[in-house]
Amino acid sequence: MPKKIRELKKMLRQAGFDCKRIRGSHERWLHRQLPELPITLAGKDSQDAKPYLEKLVNAALQKLKEKE
């Protein structure tokens, strides 16, 4: 079952990402240790996340763990 957009936002927030820009339904999330990897989430909080968004968030969290 796919995660909701709000769950992805929660995961990013807990990992130290900040929402730097909102334009319509698109939010740009950045982490100071990963400036080369911005994440753009599109959709409302209650919508199911697309599989590519889940993969992108999981990859960013994994890369962050490797840097620590």
Image (cartoon, rainbow, N blue to C red):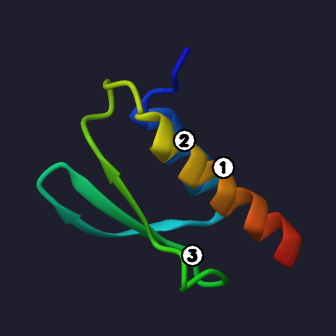
Q: Are there few (<14), some (14-19), or many (20+) residues within 10 Å of tag 2?
A: some
Which residue lies under the disc numbered 3? Answer: 31
**Residue at 64%, 53% in the rendered image:** 14
Labels 2, 3: front one: 2
Q: x, y (%) of residue 2?
A: 51, 22
Look at mark 1 in the image and give the residue it sits on: 58
Residue 60: where, in percent of width, then height? Answer: 64, 62
Task: Quote the CA–CA distance across marks 1 and 3.
Answer: 14 Å
**Which residue is labeled 2 in the image?**
54
* Mark 2 to mark 1 CA distance (whole Å): 6 Å
Residue ID at (32%, 24%): 46
Horizontal placement of 35 versus 25: left or right? right
* Quadrant including the N terminus: top right
Identify which residue, 52 or 3, lies in the foreground: 52
Q: List x then y, in percent, for residue 16.
A: 63, 66
Q: CA distance from mark 2 to mark 3?
A: 17 Å
Pointer 1 with pointer 3, Cβ within 8 A: no
Please rate how many residues cluster around mark 1, counting C-alpha atoms within 10 Å: few if below 14, some from 14 to 19, many from 20: some
Which of discs 1 and 3 lies nearer the camera? The answer is 1
